Amino acid sequence: SGGAWKLLSGLGSGQTQVDDPQADDVAYWCHPLDVHFATKGLQGWPKLLLQVWHQDALGRSEVLGYGFCHLPATPGWHALTCLTWRPRGSWRERLRRRWLGGGPQLLSPPALTAAGAGERFRLRTETAGAVHLQLGVLLRRFGRYGV
């Protein structure tokens, strides 16, 4: 969230559980997000930053993809799809990722999302899948200010 937003309760960041898909390539999470903000202005509307990690057969963890999406500005139940991506790297890095695991990672993912897509154009990226979200949004006293 931007500088006008203050986190009242809940966690600003966290980690969910691990899922091991057995039948297909779909992992299921059921991780509640309970976050309460107060704001003095609408600039810097909160975003959800995702880092999807993968654990290989040897137990090594690596970033599978990054993604972010803006939280809805209207109250109610929302279904969102957050597309994920990862740095592409050189052909050597891609070959290394395929056989040894690992690969290029961002040094500071939150800084990239704070800057927005305007800074991401400098990176060579590839798609890494999608995360489907179901969110319930409550707004309190926004009607007073025409929102």
Image (spheres, grey):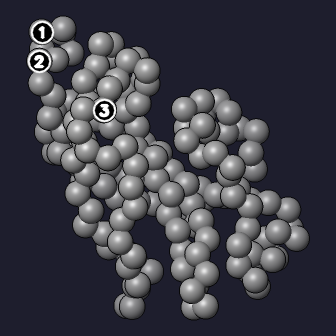
**If the image is split into quadrants, where does the N terminus sit?**
top left
Tell me what residue is drawn at x 74 percent, y 75 percent.
97
SS assignment at label 2: loop
Left or right position of 7 against 99: left
**From the viewer's perspective, is residue 7 above or below residue 141?**
below
Q: Residues within 10 Å of mark 1 (few under 14, many from 20)?
A: few
SS assignment at label 3: strand
Question: Which of the marked residues, 3 or 2, is nearer the chain's N terminus?
Answer: 3
Residue 134 horizontal/vertical position (percent)? 24, 53
Give the amino acid type for the residue marked by disc 3 in the picture.
Answer: Leu
- Circles 1 and 2, Cβ within 8 Å, touching? The answer is yes
Q: Identify which residue, 90 or 15, lies in the foreground.
A: 15
Tag 2 residue: 141
Residue 100 horizontal/vertical position (percent)? 75, 83
Give the numbered dot on residue 7: 3
Left or right position of 84 against 108: left
**If the image is split into quadrants, where does the C terminus sit?**
top left
